[in-house]
Image (tube, coloured by chain):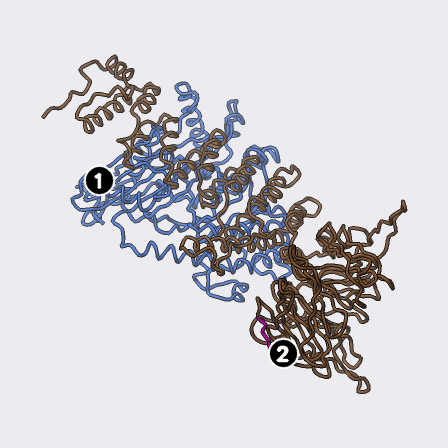
Chain colours: A blue, B brown
Amino acid sequence: MAAAAAGAGSGAWAAQEKQFPPALLSFFIYNPRFGPREGEEENKILFYHPNEVEKNEKIRNVGLCEAIVQFTRTFSPSKPAKSLHTQKNRQFFNEPEENFWMVMVVRNPIIEKQSKDGKPIIEYQEEELLDKVYSSVLQQCYSMYKLFNGTFLKAMEDGGVKLLKERLEKFFHRYLQTLHLQSCDLLDIFGGISFFPLDKMTYLKIQSFINRMEESLNIVKYTAFLYNDQLIWSGLEQDDMRILYKYLTTSLFPRHIEPELAGRDSPIRAEMPGNLQHYGRFLTGPLNLNDPDAKCRFPKIFVNTDDTYEELHLIVYKVTTIFPSHPTLDFCRRLDSIVGPQLTVLASDICEQFNINKRMSGSEKEPQFKFIYFNHMNLAEKSTVHMRKTPSVSLTSVHPDLMKILGDINSDFTRVDEDEEIIVKAMSDYWVVGKKSDRRELYVILNQKNANLIEVNEEVKKLCATQFNNIFFLD
Amino acid sequence: MGEEDYYLELCERPVQFEKANPVNCVFFDEANKQVFAVRSGGATGVVVKGPDDRNPISFRMDDKGEVKCIKFSLENKILAVQRTSKTVDFCNFIPDNSQLEYTQECKTKNANILGFCWTSSTEIVFITDQGIEFYQVLPEKRSLKLLKSHNLNVNWYMYCPESAVILLSTTVLENVLQPFHFRAGTMSKLPKFEIELPAAPKSTKPSLSERDIAMATIYGQLYVLFLRHHSRTSNSTGAEVVLYHLPREGACKKMHILKLNRTGKFALNVVDNLVVVHHQDTETSVIFDLKLRGEFDGSVTFHHPVLPARSIQPYQIPIAGKTGSAEESVLPFHHVAGFTMIFGSYLWNLQVKLEPIVNLLPDKGRLMDFLLQRKECKMVILSVCSQMLSESDRASLPVIATVFDKLNHEYKKYLDAEQSYAMAVEAGQSRSSPLLKRPVRTQAVLDQSDVYTHVLSAFVEKKEMPHKFVIAVLMEYIRSLNQFQIAVQHYLHELVIKTLVQHNLFYMLHQFLQYHVLSDSKPLACLLLSLESFYPPAHQLSLDMLKRLSTANDEIVEVLLSKHQVLAALRFIRGIGGHDNISARKFLDAAKQTEDNMLFYTIFRFFEQRNQRLRGSPNFTPGEHCEEHVAFFKQIFGDQALMRPTTF
């Protein structure tokens, strides 16, 4: 990879220069209605991270945010402030439920240089962070909380401020540790879902399988079907699926793959024939069905919080994910016996399809370009920029500066409704192309020596013709 | 036993004839299904009635002695009457031919005629105790010509008119059967075969009785049915019917055994390819279907009755001159392998009632297998489908899937046959070629419109049905069609969409479209467009679909223009190379409507350039009707902004 043009520490510089990625400074949730009178300000604070911070500072910070939001509201009553830029950090504001505010403070990336006299000079990179990326991260925090705990209001109804505080503490204490702010990028804005490409017949067979399973196990309310971290079917509504998908692919699945790779398989799997990775076992719930004392504790999730507000249990049976209302061990056994054998057949069908897909894409040479595609309408997302998602970081195969350009193009797209196209010549031989057509966005990174604008345009046209020939995508 | 329980019934209009008595002799001809009532040897009249003809034939003939057998040739052309054991008399019933009787004596000396059979309108076979003689009748000459004969000792014979096969019983045990096949003046000898007789006590001489043998065509194949009675020495639980398959070529082979699980007297019928066995002691009948799965032991398939035994539905015989009517339970005693049944002075066709069977056969897969083979099955099958989707009798999805798969299997077979026929016709094979037959569409072929009209459209309207079930059923039907590689009609897709929309399940709909489960079509794309106000992504889905159709470019332009995406429309049409033929006025109109002057300028300039390129001048021609737009352009941007013609 070519050396970056701006600020990237590499080679000889590395000895004198230290880089610090963006980091979470603080994260708090408050409700101004809870302590409107002087002296009661502490009551406003529902959650504060880091907790060690002195009480008065907490109150001051919350008060500052409240003031900024209140102040900026005079200028834009419908769209209150989303973020505050300072030299050292950025603050992001989000009001997910009325009067409940979530604030995330992120420290700007730092470069520490040695001055001639040996003293370290700290340089804050004020323009590095993208507002949209971190606003999305903050929104995701709320969605994730809501998925497992329901709304703030519901907690208030159930057990008042005390319960809400408990829930927030319990959830965010762990969740904040999993935020990896240094590797957030465009994909966090999209919050997309990667769909598994599948032929019609196999898809219909899966449909049929799901319908039959839901019929024979009538406590199953919704089913989602994934293969290889990619979604095939969701009975849940889009927004709920979006956050659940995020949880499954970035948290639950990676957690379970690691022990598997280490060879610590569950006893059930050993009985299964074949060598496919995906065989019936529970990722949530009982490990061993033959153990009568096995605990049937499944995580609760909350969906459709806007209207029906359903409280369900999340059962993840490897390959399929389902949501019954009251599972028992007996249910698990039935599920195992119904789903297990049929899944064996389906899994081999899908696996076949997977190999066909692989062969088709493998037949081409390593392409000269990488792309990210996102469709706002179905949240479909496809990236050849990103490598495997792991619970710790999402690895990209391109330089962070290019990722930032993508983010900038995305911000430009957001400003206007019309379709547009932006072509950027980046450092070295890189070209970055962004296209927006009818709520679809495509970002292409090309690396071609001495290419000119026309050639780049041609190249992107070719890419669209091969990768997106079955959708209406204006060139 | 409720009335709905009887699955066998007699036809509504029986053939009624005068009961046999000392002066009236009654004969039945299986070939023409005619009953002859001969009074006083014919002197006081002969009345011939068939099941179909309303007008009985009646005539007189001289009483030349006791009539042993009387039959018309096919199409009632010539009447043959046997009065002695040596001769058969003939009488022409052809207009303009002499009606004087003529006689044929059997050729073999000292032979006795056992009977005769017509194999066509002018060909007749005499069966004697010493062989068979095949004649052609020459009605004009009032004589017969011997075509062929064959000598062998005959105990008894049997004729199957549908397949024109005569079976002769030979040897002492009577159990070696010699078949002959007749066709257009030829007689061919088929390989003979032996019926295995059950072991019997030594004191009694075993022999094959004519009464225990029948011939019938079942599913297009000729079978010899042998009623093997329960023998005390064997451990078998009851009598059974053994079916020997008699192919056109090759040896006869024992293929099926029907287990009756009873003993006593039986009678056989074959109705609609079903073997009906009547048990006289219990006055009940059972049916067997060779196509239903039986137990195969490596050479023979064993079948059990499809349904529990039931009586034939009692028939009301109207009694002339009386106001009431007598109900008689029907007991078939006449052993006919056809489908007719004679009782007293009536001749009926036996019929199978399918409706009661629906409730007697709980296994829906087996029920479908059974129904799909029946002649009049369509409405019953459709009602089974409706029933299994009804709230009270709702079947489980796997059962529904099985039923759909069976329907579509039959449907696909027909479609394939149609297709290969069409291809053969296209390839120029002559229509008269015997190999080229247009496939017959039986009632078992239930296509998408049948299922849609009679089952699914009513089903989705049912408010009380959980929508999850409704959608699952529709998807199951579509899955089944796809599995048999049958192209799904758009109205089924529309049904799915309507159901999903009704329940606000747009995300599901989106996923179906994303995976192309709902096939692309213009009607579907239009339907999606109409949904945009409820579900905005429908617009994108619709455009994608139109794009994939590749025949809907005009529609795409219209859609984009209606959304005021004039530039997008123009770029699209240019992208596919159609921009030289589009109407400038349409685009300028749309651009003007946006009230975006720069857009209007761009579009206007584009067409000026097109004019320049096509005609060498940027001006619009009067035929384009763009005067109004030129004026508008001048008004906004001034005269000097108009493109100047480039001259070389």
Disc 1 residue type (three-letter): Ala
Q: Which mark is residue A426?
A: 1
Q: Are tags 1 and 2 found on a single chain?
A: no
Q: What segment carries the magenta color?
A: B186-192
Q: How crowded is mark 2: few (under 14 residues within 10 Å), some or many (20 or more)?
A: some
Q: Quadrant of the C terminus of chain B?
A: top left
In this view, the mark in front (1 or 2): 2
Nearer-the-camera pick, B374 or B458 = B374
Q: In the picture provided, is A33 more to the left or to the right than B395? A: left
Quadrant location of residue B305? bottom right
Q: What residue occupies the far left of the structure in this picture? A: B648
Q: Which chain carries label 1?
A: A
Q: Residue B150 carries which label?
A: 2
Disc 2 residue type (three-letter): His
Q: Is residue B630 above or below residue A185?
A: above
The answer to whether any part of residue B614 appears in the image is yes
Q: Position of residue B475 (x, y in %)?
A: 55, 47
SS at badge 1: loop
Q: Position of residue A182 (x, y in %)?
A: 34, 43
Q: How crowded is mark 1: few (under 14 residues within 10 Å), some or many (20 or more)?
A: some
Quadrant location of residue A438? top left
The answer to whether any part of residue B175 appears in the image is no
Q: Position of residue B320 (x, y in %)?
A: 87, 48
Q: Where is residue B538 in the image (x, y as percent from the top left)?
A: 45, 35
Asked if residue B188 is among those painted magenta in the image, a careful observer would answer yes
Q: Residue at x 61, y 75 (%)?
A: B252
Q: Residue B488 carries which label?
A: none
Q: In the picture provided, is B497 more to the left or to the right than A398? A: right
SS at badge 2: strand
Kindly indicate whether the residue at mark 2 contacts the one at mark 1 (C-beta within 8 angstroms).
no
